[in-house]
Image (cartoon, helix red, strand yellow):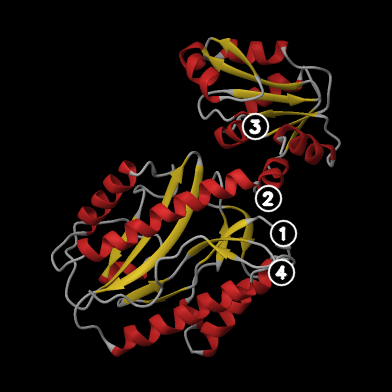
Amino acid sequence: MDRSKVLLKEAAKIKCNSLIAFEPENVFYTTGFWGEAVAIINKDGVKLITPKLEIERAKKDSEKCEVIPTERGSNMIEILLSNLTNDTTCTDCNDITTFKVIEKKTELIYSTEVFYHSRKIKDDNEIKIVAHTANILDKLFALCEKIIRVNVTEKYLQATLLYEAMKMGAYPPSYKYTLSPLIVASGINSTLPHAEPTNRNIRNGDVITVDLTLRHKGYVADATRTFAIGRISSEIRKIYGVVEEAQEAGLDAVKTGAICGEVDNTCRSLIERKGYGKYFIHSAGHGIGLEVHERPWIRTKNKEVLEKNMIITIEPGVYIPNKFGVRIEDSIVVGEKTKNLNRYTKKMIIL
């Protein structure tokens, strides 16, 4: 897949015939280089403008583009302007000062949607990379069986998993709404879908939610398993069964042509019928790729249609205030036959 052609085709829908990418995900998608840079895409090809301190890495990592060195700061914008044509240009630039400077040189339209729409269908290589990342997550879940013990802290478990992940070539993505790269939440902390790991000791009777989001070669896989330890209550067993059933129903609902909101409703309605609807407090899933959360959104009322080779998560959860929470999540490839990239068991693991 020639990604510059995909981007130009998408840009043409808003009457643009060139693009300028500032966001690192969009620069990487276009050039294969992740770093401080700006990419220009038009009918003549792709130009990657990057500071001199990044130039050798840019030349090594980038593909199918001309690499142009520059100084940082205003000189970078001057070089950008000197390489622009008189096209109508789409950009993801969200800095108003920079936008106004560029706008003096070319007709400029701000749109992140052009980039998201281009990225939402994955090619074979992208799928292969995400599948490899998902396999790393599975290995880490298996490792949890050995690490999770009474008196082990959430932070220790997180640190150990990160260390092992990096040994396998995976890294935590930057996600601005959390301080910690992985979610490890035990006992009452598991009631928080985006809990920050603490020094809390794991206790007998706890559930432990482990939400792993890791990046390999630029691409993210995202999966969650909820473990238990020691003697657990019948309520925990019951709710785990409800979430497991809802997640399986959601996976069964995913296929090419399915509507995102209806997939969410499949998970949600089952949980509601079991009496826990008010405790399912987030959407049933989201797209993944170069970002942790991107199109398509698997949430109520979203009428977007799933297309072949989108990669999404399905992740229902039930969170009982002041008690515990349960979430199960997989990364999956959309198709006539959905492919689950995570193979680690979803049966309840009691340690």
Quadrant housing the N terminus: top right
- Distance CA(mark 4)–CA(mark 2): 15 Å
Q: Earlier in the sequence, mark 4 or mark 2?
A: 2
Mark 1–mark 3 Cα distance, whole angstroms, equals 21 Å
Residue 307: give its label. 1
Earlier residue among tags 2 and 1: 2
Q: Amino acid at mark 4?
A: Ala
Rendered residue at 71%/69% (across/down): 258
Residue 175 visible, this angle = no
- Look at the numbered discs 4 and 1 and tell me whether their residues touch, using CB distance below 8 Å: no
- According to the image, label 3 marks what residue? 30
Residue 225 location in percent, x, y? 38, 67
| Label number found at residue 121 | 2
User: Where is residue 178 drawn, in percent x and y?
Assistant: 40, 50
Mark 1–mark 3 contact, CB under 8 Å? Answer: no
Asked if residue 144 lies left or right of residue 95, the reply is left
Residue 258: mark in rendering? 4
The secondary structure type at the circle numbered 3 is helix
Marks 3 and 2, the one that precedes in the sequence: 3
Decide: is 205 above or below 121: below
Question: Callout 2, which amino acid?
Answer: Ile
Please provide percent x and percent y for residue 116: 67, 45
Q: Amino acid at mark 3?
A: Thr
